[in-house]
Amino acid sequence: MPDFIERFGQPLGANGSMVLTSSRQSIITSLLSAGTFVGALAQAFTSDRFGRKGSIIIWASIFTVGVLIQTATNRSVVQLVIGRFVAGLGVGALSAIVPLYNGEAAPKKIRGAMLVFYQLQIISGYVIDLATHSIKGSGSWRIPVGLQLVWGVVLIGGMLLLPESPRHLLGRGHEAEAQKVIASLNSVPFEDPLVISAMEELKAAICEENDGGKATWMECFSTRNMLWKRTINGMMIQFLQQLNGQNFYYYYGDTFFKSAGTTLSPYVIQVILGAVSVAGTVPALYLIETWGRRRSLLTGAAIQAVCALIAGLVGHYFVPVGTDLKPVSELTARNKQGGNILIAFAVLHVMAFSVFWGPTPWVYLGESFPLRVRPKGIALGSATNWLWNFLLGFFSPRIAARIGPLILLIFFGMLVVAFFYVWLLIPETKGLSLEEVDEMYRSGVKPWRSAEWKPSHKYGDAVIDGSEKRPVEKRISSGTSDAGVHHHSEKKVNGGQSEFVENA
């Protein structure tokens, strides 16, 4: 974008032409990352005090202010980076609160798909931003920056129409309002048995969580209810997501494409990779609830590891990059063949990431913690993601400048680590309510056997259905309710004792 360089670059050479030096580019980029890290942690202080709904509105407003500061910038680099930092605060906070809100408010059978859809919207926005590079003047950068104002206002307005998380309401003692929200989310009457059942389950879980007083940050690493393991898992899965290596292709995609003899511009290459990311996220909407979290992560790690290994070796031995880069006219058949192989596996790597490792870590993070420490646990996971996003963005180009495509072998090694980490330590949470996830961790089930695990809640009190009381001895897995409970029917078993089973 020449206009952006002319406004915010530095004069270089005798003719005074403007360039965007690596140091200035690093400052502009890193201030956003710094803001996201701070925001991801700061939201934990607002999520409980102002509620999930109120916090989203607050941080979306802060994000909108940051975007406004950037859009209004004329030639001040200081104003630009301040705007990026403020916007980053909102981005980081929302990256934690939105999965938190979706996880608590969405029905369990579509909870994963809702969080995947959140990831899909992020990727789609990236492609839209790339579409304005050919516009002359400041519109080339003001339009994609300014468009964020629209989405900020839409988010604020939309949240005004949505309910508060029923789990948060119940945790704050607003039982009637929580019951009303659960009924509304399930489109059933206020006194419907499934609403009463959900309320009883949530109240039991919240009472148990509140026995220890107010939660602290250190409690996220305590042995109580395996919280230390859940926190470490959330942070590790976000760390491993950033070390998948897909971002490397965005940094060096133009070099790879040129090595294959293409004349596509860097912007077109970025659009291609962005379109692949969008296309890959769509099937994840289905797979996250059919394959589950573990299977998605394991499959993605295996596919991406193969892609990184092949692309790294082919790129090193067959493709001229860096100082060895040749004009298209001088490329040999061997160079072009190697470039084509590298491009194919680069696209497959990006596609596999979008299907599996792009959305799934956020889904897992949003459903891993009990209500008591959920904002803090998600904050630690999100902050880990943004911290490594900054570190990789800062160091990867420097490492790649020294060893070229062999950097992909580093990512290959991390993907192997990711595969075994998921196999040994990440349990399956598909189809479970957030309270059932809590019980599963307490049960000590082995992660590789967690897909077959069933909850074993027992309630001795009656479930009220109008004026009639019906005893409930046990609630089996498919019948357990959460904020998005599904309809159940009563089945008489064991001499008249009733048991809930889910309708087909």
Image: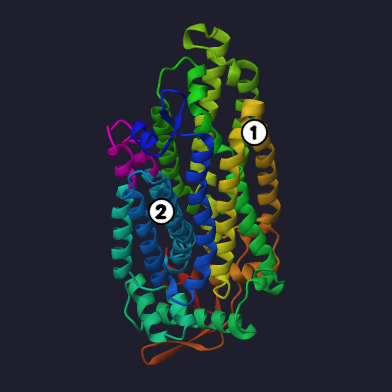
In screen coordinates, is 131 left or right of 34? left
Q: Which quadrant is the N terminus positioned in?
A: top left
Q: Which quadrant is the C terminus positioned in?
A: bottom left
| Element on which disc 2 rests | helix
Q: Which residues are magenta?
A: 126-145
Say which residue appears at 49% left-offset and 67% top-offset: 43
Image coordinates of residue 252 in percent, x first then y, are 53, 29
Farthest-out residue, front: 14
Residue 229, compared with residue 421, is above or below; it is: below
From where the camera sits, is residue 433 visible?
no
Q: How is the image coloured?
A: rainbow
Tell me which corner region of the image, top left, top right, bottom left or bottom right, holds residue 245.
top right
Residue 100, compared with residue 9, is above or below; it is: below
Q: Residues within 10 Å of mark 2 (few under 14, many from 20)?
A: many
Say which residue appears at 34% left-offset and 48% top-offset: 73
Looking at the rendered structure, the kind of residue marked 2 is Gly
What label sits on residue 399 in the rendered view?
Answer: 1
